[in-house]
Image (tube, rainbow, N blue to C red):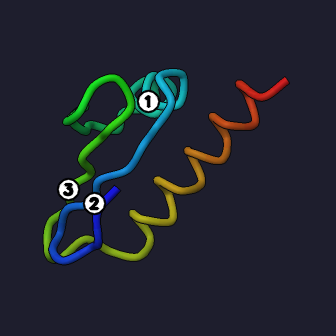
Amino acid sequence: MHPVEANGVFVHLPAKLQQGLRDKGWKFYTFVPPTGCRLMCAWDTTRETIDALLSDARDVVAAITP
C-alpha cells in the first residue's frame, strides 16, 4: 500500500488470509478495513521469522484457493 520506510509494512490482505494467519498465531492490525493491514516487526526480527510468516501465508492461500 505504501513504500517501506521503517519496521512497518502496509499491505492488502483478503479477509480469509487475515483470518488464516491469525489462526496460526500471527498478530497484526487491520489498519484500513477491510483489507488494509499493518504488519510491524522489531528491529531485531530474524529472517527466519519473516520466512515463517511467508510460509504460513502460502499455506493459507493454498488452503483457501479452490
Q: Element under label 3?
A: strand
Q: Position of residue 53 (x, y in %)?
A: 46, 53
Q: Quadrant of residue 23?
A: top left
Q: Quadrant of residue 61?
A: top right
Q: Residue furthest right?
A: 66
Q: Nearer the viewer, mark 2 or mark 3?
A: 2
Q: Secondary structure at mark 2?
A: strand
Tag of residue 18: 1
Instruction: Kindly identify the amino acid type of the residue bearing the numbered disc 1.
Output: Gln
Tag 2 residue: 9
Q: Position of residue 8 (x, y in %)?
A: 20, 62
- The answer for how far apart the CA atoms under marks 2 and 3 are is 6 Å
Q: Which residue is mark 3?
A: 40
Say if mark 2 contacts mark 3, CB within 8 Å.
yes
- Residue drawn at (34%, 23%) of the image: 34
The quadrant the N terminus occupies is bottom left
- The answer for how far apart the CA atoms under marks 3 and 1 are is 15 Å
* Viewer-side residue, 25 vs 37: 37
Residue 19 lies, in percent from the top left, at 45, 22
Q: Is residue 8 left or right of residue 20?
A: left
Give the class, few, some or many, for how many residues have Cα within 10 Å of label 2's Cα (few <14, many ≥20): some
